[in-house]
Image (cartoon, rainbow, N blue to C red):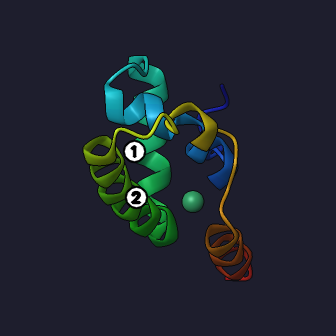
Amino acid sequence: MIQNDYITCRELIGFLADYLEGRLTEEQRHEFDRHLSVCPSCVNYLDAYRKTVALGRLALTPSDSSAQGRAPEGLLQAIKSARRN
Ligand SMILES: [Zn+2]
């Protein structure tokens, strides 16, 4: 992995479930945190995702894996506006 390059928001979303389950390697986790440090929209998304997962567990919905690789509309909008900066 190239050190000066940040992972994309899409990649971060792909890591999200593993991140929350503590399954990332040290390097992946480092890249994840580095992206979060420069991307407020992903910080917001992570926060919302955590709450959604908490609710999902209460409801016992088997939707954890289907969330991977799929970015909700609201997030895509946030990414587009963030990239204009
Ligand atoms: Zn991001």
The answer to which quarter of the image holds residue 25 is top left
Q: Which residue is mark 2?
A: 37
In contact (CB < 8 Å): disc 2 and disc 1? yes
Q: Residue 72 vs residue 45: left or right?
A: right
Q: Which amino acid type corresponds to the residue marked 2 in the rendered image?
A: Ser
- Taking depth in this image into account, of 31 and 70 the one nearest to the observer is 70
At x 50%, y 71%, the residue is 41
Q: Is residue 66 above or below residue 72?
A: above
- Taking depth in this image into account, of 60 and 31 the one nearest to the observer is 60
Q: Residue 51 vs residue 19: left or right?
A: left
Q: Which residue is mark 1?
A: 33
At x 70%, y 48%, the residue is 70
- Taking depth in this image into account, of 67 and 26 the one nearest to the observer is 67
Can I make out residue 47 in this image? Answer: yes
Q: Which amino acid type corresponds to the residue marked 1 in the rendered image?
A: Asp
Q: Is residue 83 above or below residue 71?
A: below
The answer to which quarter of the image holds residue 24 is top left
At x 69%, y 41%, the residue is 69
Residue 43 x %, y % = 40, 63
Q: Quadrant of the N terminus?
A: top right
Residue 19 x %, y % = 40, 33
Quarter, ligand 1: bottom right
Q: Residue 43 vs residue 81: left or right?
A: left
Report, in whole angstroms, how far the alpha carbon at label 2 lies from the one at label 1: 6 Å
Q: Is residue 2 above or below residue 35?
A: above
